[in-house]
Image (cartoon, rainbow, N blue to C red):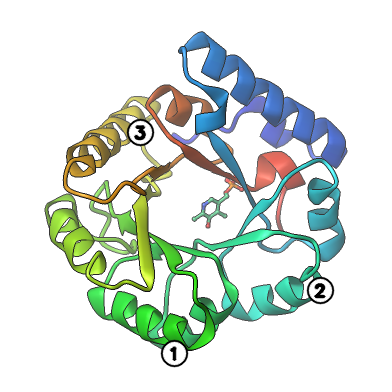
Amino acid sequence: MFVSSPEVAIPTLSIEERIHRVVDEVRATALRVGRDLTQIKILAVSKQKTVADIRALVSHGFRDFGESYVAEALPKLDSLASAGCIWHYVGVVQSNKTKRLAQHFDWVQSIDRIHIGKRLADVRDEFSTTPLNVCVQVNIDEEPTKAGVSVDQVPEMVDQLQQFPQLQVRGLMAIPNPEAHRDATRNSFRQMRELFETLRTKTTSHWDTLSMGMSGDYVMAIEEGATLIRIGTALFGPRN
Ligand SMILES: *Cc1c(COP(=O)(O)O)cnc(C)c1O
């Protein structure tokens, strides 16, 4: 069974209280397991949240934000154009959305088909001189309905994506099965870490991102080596 952390279940907290709880817990976990806090980035996943909510986090020093739906995200990105945010796309990538993704986002964490990578690279060339940061999404628990490549396909995918100079291949992203027991989730995080370290020797020096852990399991993800945790509910409160 999926068990939320207690703070996720309290809908009445203010955004400030939520931020403090998450930041304190990340800090305490890093200290406990001997990890450098600067190696753990918090991505605030702002889907279904307003521009005002995002500004509240910006005013507390957050810079990295994640969105899952292109149509919802673009007006928000536009309103926040001068806020200095770094935008990560973490949703399913559809071929007909690649143009807008490559044009407006700084990162696409959810690449799982090589032709999507190629399209993003082609479009990026038209719009920007800086490469698009990308991660390969791994379907770590081999769920039939989930996006992502299987573990044995990852090295080939990383290899192919690295051929595109318009893409900076930063690492791996995974969303373990939310129905799994915590021991199984920990095991999935461990497998991700192993894969990430194995590929480090074969990749460029920018291979620095292991994106795993959400509101219900980010402590465990940090314990197992996540360098980027993707937090929605625990920062912004519940979504509809
Ligand atoms: C929504 C979402 C999150 C954040 O989930 P919470 O449980 O609200 O923290 C993280 N990653 C992805 C890919 C998401 O779609």
Pointer 2 and pointer 1: residues touching (CB < 8 Å)? no
Task: Give the residue number, with chain letter if any, for mark 2.
Answer: 79
Q: Secondary structure at mark 1?
A: helix
Q: Which residue is mark 3?
A: 185
Which residue matches tag 1?
Answer: 96
Which residue appears at 37% of the width and 68% of the height? 167
Q: Give the spatial CA distance, label 3 vs label 1.
A: 33 Å
User: Which residue appears at 68% of the width and 35% of the height?
Assistant: 8
Compared to 71, does 25 lie above or below?
A: above
Q: Is residue 23 above or below residue 155?
A: above
Q: Mark 2 to mark 1: distance in Å?
A: 23 Å
Q: Nearer the viewer, mark 2 or mark 1?
A: 2
Residue 206 locus on image (x, y percent):
36, 49
- Quadrant position of residue 104: bottom right
Element class at badge 2: helix
Q: Earlier in the sequence, mark 3 or mark 1?
A: 1
Q: CA distance from mark 2 to mark 3?
A: 37 Å
The amino acid type of the residue labelled 3 equals Thr
- Please provide percent x and percent y for residue 168: 37, 62
Q: Residues within 10 Å of mark 3 (few under 14, many from 20)?
A: many
User: Is 32 above or below relative to 3?
Assistant: above
Q: Is residue 137 left or right of residue 178?
A: left
Decide: few, some or many residues near mark 1? Use Cα within 10 Å; few <14, some 14-19, many ≥20: few
Q: Amino acid at mark 2?
A: Ser
Q: Earlier in the sequence, mark 2 or mark 3?
A: 2
In the image, which is nearer the foreground, mark 2 or mark 3? 2
Q: Quadrant of the C terminus?
A: bottom right
Dot label at residue 14: none
